[in-house]
Amino acid sequence: MAAIETHGLRKVYPAPPPPKKRGRAAGPPGMGGPPSAPGAFGAPRGEIVALQGLDLEVREGEFFGLLGPNGAGKTTTIGILTTRVKPTAGTARVGGADVTSEAVRVRQRIGVVPQRPNPDRALNALENLLFHAAYFGIPAAVAAPRAGQLLEQLGISDKAHAKVDEMSGGQQQRLMIARALIHEPQVIFLDEPTVGLDPQTRLSLWEILRVLHNEGRTIVMTTHYMDEADKLCDRIAIVDHGQLLELDTPASLKQRAPGGTLVEVTLAGDAAAIVDAVRGLDGVLRVEAKGPLLRVYSDRGGRVISPVIQIAEDNGAAVTNISLTEPSLETLFVSRTGRKLD
């Protein structure tokens, strides 16, 4: 049985109002161009298409990663699945309940861990959990032992009576996970749960998420860290411009990564001017140019960097930055979206 299903999910945000022009009276309707002229993806001009026909299925007990560059549609997707955003078209079901017609049932079946902790700072850690449990109608006699067990499981039982501001960022994020679990949801949504945490705290949180996953919980996570998705997720979906580009296990996705090492060279000028010359170098498998950025896929690793720099200098283009990435989820992501995750 699927924990989450979406079919033809589409979301179009209305165009922002035009800026008012100072010193001129507004003309009659229709002046300055037709307001309903078609724009991107068939939407009226100025409207923002966040999702266009997204089909997804997340299995019960699966740790599912949702990756995409900024503006790809991840936040809108999570917003719809957690009932905060209404879809323009299509359907979405979470735990068997429709997000539009059965929003209350959906909210009872999900737990949400936001990107930045948002507890009630007037309450201590334990009170935050009890207050959240009461919101779901859980009596205090049931919620109190459950809250204590969660605080113990997440390693912050010693902070039960501490105010939120007395807790570190990592401890606050653990509190958010405890809050998301207090009503025993079927599905947990994590929105970039380790952003801003130091490496040690981040690894500690990974272990907590692994334990939750091993307990059979369904987890959906967005992240800006490729290694996080690679090490934690059973399957990963890559989305961009509101569309699903790839969906598979991390191992299978890495096998589809473009061959060779990715060398990215940023020039002071337009990189398209040297594409043909770079393409002729030994070991170059593929070359792409986008503005000042030159992407070179090479089976000679970093040895191609020196001749690429020489070609750039011979053409009067100064090199301002160089990066090198071995074949990985990141090289697949770049090849499919044209952008890095961060």
Image (cartoon, helix red, strand yellow):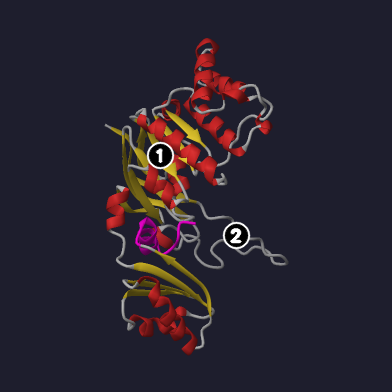
- Name the residue located 50 percent from the left edge and 61 percent from the top edge: 35
Image quadrant where one finds the N terminus? top left
Reply above or below: 212 against 296: above
Please check the rendered image and state whether residue 336 is part of the magenta-colored stretch, yes or no.
Answer: yes
Q: Residues within 10 Å of mark 1 (few under 14, many from 20)?
A: many
Residue holding disc 2: 18
Residue at the outermost right position: 23
Number of numbered discs on residues:
2
Q: Which residue is mark 1?
A: 220
Residue that appears at 46% across and 47% down: 223
Give the image location of residue 194, x and y in percent. Answer: 51, 43
Q: CA distance from mark 1 to mark 2?
A: 37 Å
Name the side, left or right, on which 67 lies relative to 2: right
Is 334 part of what is drawn in magenta? Answer: yes
Residue 27 is marked as: none
Residue 107 in which image quadrant: top left
Q: Provide the residue span drawn in magenta.
A: 327-342
Type of amino acid at the residue the image marks with label 2? Pro
